[in-house]
Image: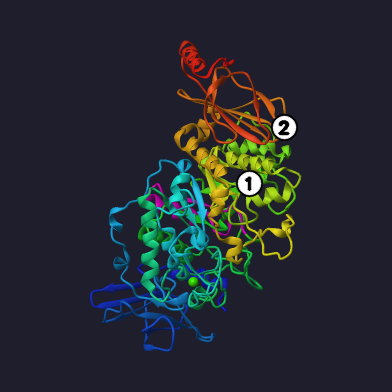
Amino acid sequence: MFSETDFEKADRENYYGGPLGVEIDGNKTIFRAWSPLATGAYIRIYADGTGSNTIETLPMERHWTGCWQVEILRNLEGFFYVYVFEFEYRYLKSTADIYAVACGVNGDRSAVVDLKKTDPFGWDTVGRPVIESPCDAVIYECHIRDFSIDESSGVKVRYRGKFLGMAEDGLYIGKGTTVGLAHLKELGVTHVQLLPIYDYATVDEAKPWEQQFNWGYDPKNYNCPEGSYSTDAESPSARIFELKTLIMELHKNGIGVIMDVVYNHTYLTENSWFDLTFPGYFYRMREDGYSNGSGVGSEIASERAMVRRYIVDSVKFWANEYKLDGFRFDLMAVLDCDTINEIRSELDKLSPYVMMYGEGWSGGECAIESSRLCYKWNNAAFPQVGLFNDDYRDAIKGATFDAYRRGYVGGNIEFTNIIKRGLAGSVAHPDISGNDEAAWAQQPYQSINYCEAHDNWTMWDKIIISCGDFTDEEKVSADRLSAALVILAQGVPFLHLGEDFLRSKPKKVHGSDLETHEFFEDNSYNSPDFTNSIKWHRKIENTEIFRYYRELVRLRRTSPLFRMRTADEIREKLHFLSTEDIGVILMKLEDESDCFAVAFNPYREAKWVDLPGGMYFVRLSESGKSHEFPMMSNHVSIPPLSAVVFERCEEELSDLREKVSKHTQRFGTRNLM
Ligand code: CA
């Protein structure tokens, strides 16, 4: 085995900054791969992505940097290839090209394609949607298969569960309930975040007729799209074309696309393409073998020069070639801050609108000093990157891993201070005392606010499990309250596909309808469609709830006070006012032109709050309605388990009186003021 010293020497003496992968130059095809300690390298060329159809095996030549190269005097577009690297001590196995941008079925062989030919018609004319600040985004996390695999999606059978299924616009069910892409538009989200769309290992692409499912956190070929989402996994260009078609359709509708990237581990370790290319180099090692900071076996050594280059190149490739609008880094704390900062500065050169955020935690102890890694507590070292706000998530829903612990929306007022922190973008704020450790963000765009994602119980399932004594109506109220907390908080709101119509992940438990945690799946990474797919008729059943989410999104997007850009602005324009009940929160947002008072009541009974000076109308009631009348001031009642948004009326009192008198004429006498 190679040692740490070998790797340090390779970084020092063999750093290579030139092109890697395949280059087609007229009638020549050039292949380049970096592996400085290999004693020999060969390329094997095939006619197909699978089977024993070798055309030829050719030796490659070593450049002093450790880059191996072979130039073939033919245009090999449409052919497949692998490399074989020779090491003195090791049995020889072939590997795909880690720099390949296309591959055959199941990603076992790399493919030569002309990327220009994979662009759908009109690709060059459709640009990225523009947002001024990450705080303007509303992110919706979707899984390609979940989105359209169920019959209720209305998608053509051959496109169900595929990239093209999500690209179908204009679909509705029942009496005009939008589904699919049209649903995204109606909800008003600005970005979708797609669970892994790069090529992953554990779905057999050669058997599309079988029901198979995986989230996709098992990377195989980082720079190729996943084949099971394509209508033809055998064709290397079909998956590229179809993914680009989806991105173009979303862009046409003003929706950005964020890619979930998993540079913290690979599915295989010893037999991964990384290890077959340069054994050990791509992973952090301990004396007894591979380190496990990812929690799943292999921990990528992002700090090594050519590993860092690989990750930076890979993100840049996706951002450029696929016009992606953002990247979500899985277990980002396995990666070092320098790598993440380098990606940020490279993306800034491309477009400042490309978002970057990730999970500020790892899956175990990493093999380098934690102060160098992207942990949430270390965020000042990578301040331009967002982080999932797990404090806020847990305060809203209760503990993530303790099924029965209630959150604020279940009436647990122990969490009130953390909820206030979250509402204020988790930046330091003079109105909040105590819990200072939860004021972790320097700026609001760093805080990705959520209560539900693909991991753990859905919000609705968690409410059912933890709030068993609530009536059905109370459960719905608790869910609405969770939505208001996520969407009306400073920072960046993040929703999970179907959360807006009470998504549930039932397990297949025969003969049981008990609503305990055993009935619901909290880790559905390979669960069947029964558990994971979106049943779109659920939107018809919960249409009022969906409308509430939609109105919250609309309010946020139309009122800049709900998406302030900086911590200073938040400290100036957002204030918490005192309330009689310790769990009730009254938040005032005010600038030169607008003033909102937002009340949150986590109790199972109505509570009273005292609005600040002025006359108010209900901008958004607990059920998502806007009422210009009656106007109110001072002492107002907030329904149980709800959020109510009041907006101050800026008109002169005389105008108000006139309005009231007109209202009285129309609706009869009621005491309005
Ligand atoms: Ca795959």
- The amino acid on which the numbered mark 1 sits, given as a three-letter code, is Arg
Q: Of label 1 and label 2, which has the lower sequence position?
A: 1
- The amino acid on which the numbered mark 2 sits, given as a three-letter code, is Glu
Which element type, helix, strand or loop, lies under badge 1? helix
Q: Which residue is mark 1?
A: 393
Closer-to-camera residue (124/338):
124
Q: Which residues are magenta?
A: 333-362
The quarter of the picture where residue 640 lies is top right
**Rendering coords of residue 465 (x, y %):** 72, 51
- How is the structure coloured here? rainbow
Q: Specify the farthest residue to the left.
A: 26
Q: Residue at x 50, y 50 (%)?
A: 140
Q: Residue at x 48, y 46 (%)?
A: 384
Please, is residue 365 above or below residue 486 in the view?
Answer: below
Q: Which residue is mark 2?
A: 605
Between the C-alphas of marks 1 and 2, the distance is 24 Å
Which element type, helix, strand or loop, lies under badge 2? loop
Whether residue 580 appears in magenta in the rendering, the answer is no
